[in-house]
Amino acid sequence: MAEPTTSNTSAATTDQPGRPYYENLRTSLRETLNKKRKLDEQLAALEDNIYKLEGNYLEETNGAGNIVRGFDGWVKGVVVGADKRAADDRKARTRIRDEDRIFSRSSMSWMRVSRFCLS
């Protein structure tokens, strides 16, 4: 048997020559996973913001028309924002369909969730 040395580092390198390389890879992996976690959180926040803004747009333009459903209401002369109470009643009656959410539905996260939900 080999005699114990005073330095554990030198013993580790002589007994396990690949150990420093392994530790560097392990540290790099840990840092990369932390970066990925932060990026995933930022992506989720951005997608949530897009979802909310898209919902606001679809609600506000429901009567007159919008880029998703067309502008038939605008052509027919519907006045937007004339009566606040009527607009609030319309918002309560109308629901935003998932098919109308063209921006939210285009994200990879939405596709991943919908694939698991539909399966």
Image (tube, rainbow, N blue to C red):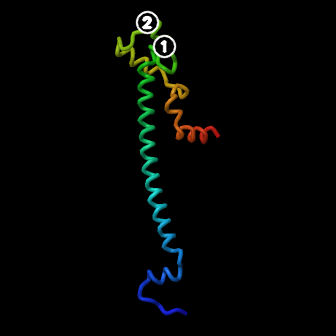
Instruction: Depth check: give the residue in front, 19 or 79.
Output: 19
Q: Amino acid at mark 1?
A: Phe
Label of residue 71 in the image:
1
Q: Residues within 10 Å of mark 2 (few under 14, many from 20)?
A: few
Indicate the position of residue 43 as horizontal and vertical percent values.
45, 43
Which residue is situated farthest in the top direction here?
A: 76
Image position of 101 (left or right of 38): right
- What amino acid is found at the position of numbered circle 2 in the picture? Gly
- Location of residue 89 by image quarter: top left
Badge 1 crowding class, 10 Å Cα cut-off, few under 14, some 14 to 19, many 20 or more, is some
| Front tag of 1 and 2 | 1
Percent from the top left, x then y, of residue 36? 46, 52
Q: Which residue is mark 2?
A: 77
Numbered disc total: 2
Query: Percent position (x, y) of residue 102?
Result: 52, 28
Q: Quadrant of residue 50?
A: top left
Identify whether 30 is placed above or below 5: above
Q: Residue at x 45, y 23 (%)?
A: 58
Q: Secondary structure at mark 2?
A: loop
Nearer to us in this view, 36 or 119:
36
